[in-house]
Amino acid sequence: MNTLPKGITGFWRMGQNGIPKTSKSMIKKVVNIFKSNSNFWKVLLVQQQADNNFYQILISDKNGNYKIGINTTYPFYCGIKSLEDWETVEFCDLPENISRLIPNELIELRTDFLNEILKPRHITALDKVELEQIKYWKTKKVGNVIFNKYD
């Protein structure tokens, strides 16, 4: 993906139409897939908060604990390594046994792409209000535009 789609940040002008939303039924479907699979436990959905633009699904299996981030606007997901910093999200690639259970309607974004340095070509389709947020927060990585903690 060379150019990020308009609305990816979760910010847009009041009254602006045409910004999509990731289906809440799709989010529930993913949660139910993991809850119904005996290889996973402690499955928890964390709703989008006022200071971010993604849902989180927390899951555990015999190998550890994992966080899946799902963008609220577009059907993109990723592995989240850390949310400790109040500004940025650190990413990780999800294990294959997790990724293959997530429906194809959701598109996995891998760490190599998410950690790319943000360049002008990435943001050409974004709205003015999105560009202002990127500038204000001094966002440096593509992934921190797609999965952000702007408030």
Image: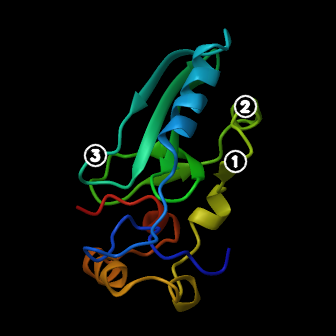
The foreground one among 43 and 140 is 43
Q: Residue at x 58, y 49 (%)?
A: 78
Task: State left or right for residue 33 relative to residue 45.
Answer: right
Image position, residue 119 (x, y; %): 53, 86
Q: Amino acid at mark 2?
A: Leu
- Does the CB distance between marks 2 and 1 fall below 8 Å? no
Q: Look at the numbered disc 3 and give the secondary structure of its residue.
A: loop
Q: Quadrant of residue 45?
A: top left
What residue sits right under mark 1 in the picture? 105
What residue sits right under mark 3 in the picture? 49
**Callout 3 environment at 10 Å: few (<14), some (14 to 19), or many (20+)?**
few
What residue sits right under mark 2 in the picture? 101
Image position, residue 31 (x, y; %): 54, 26
Q: Amino acid at mark 3?
A: Gln
Image position, residue 60 (x, y; %): 55, 20
Where is 61 relative to 66, above or below?
A: above
Q: Looking at this view, name the residue that lies furthest to the top.
A: 38
Q: Amino acid at mark 1?
A: Glu
Q: Residue at x 63, y 57 (%)?
A: 111
**In terms of sequence position, does the residue under pointer 2 or pointer 3 come before the other?**
3
Of tags 3 and 1, the one toward the viewer is 1
Q: Quadrant of residue 114?
A: bottom right
Task: Give the CA separation, mark 2 to mark 1.
Answer: 12 Å
Q: Look at the numbered disc 2 and give the secondary structure of its residue.
A: loop
Q: Residue at x 25, y 54 (%)?
A: 51
Where is 108 relative to 120, above or below?
A: above
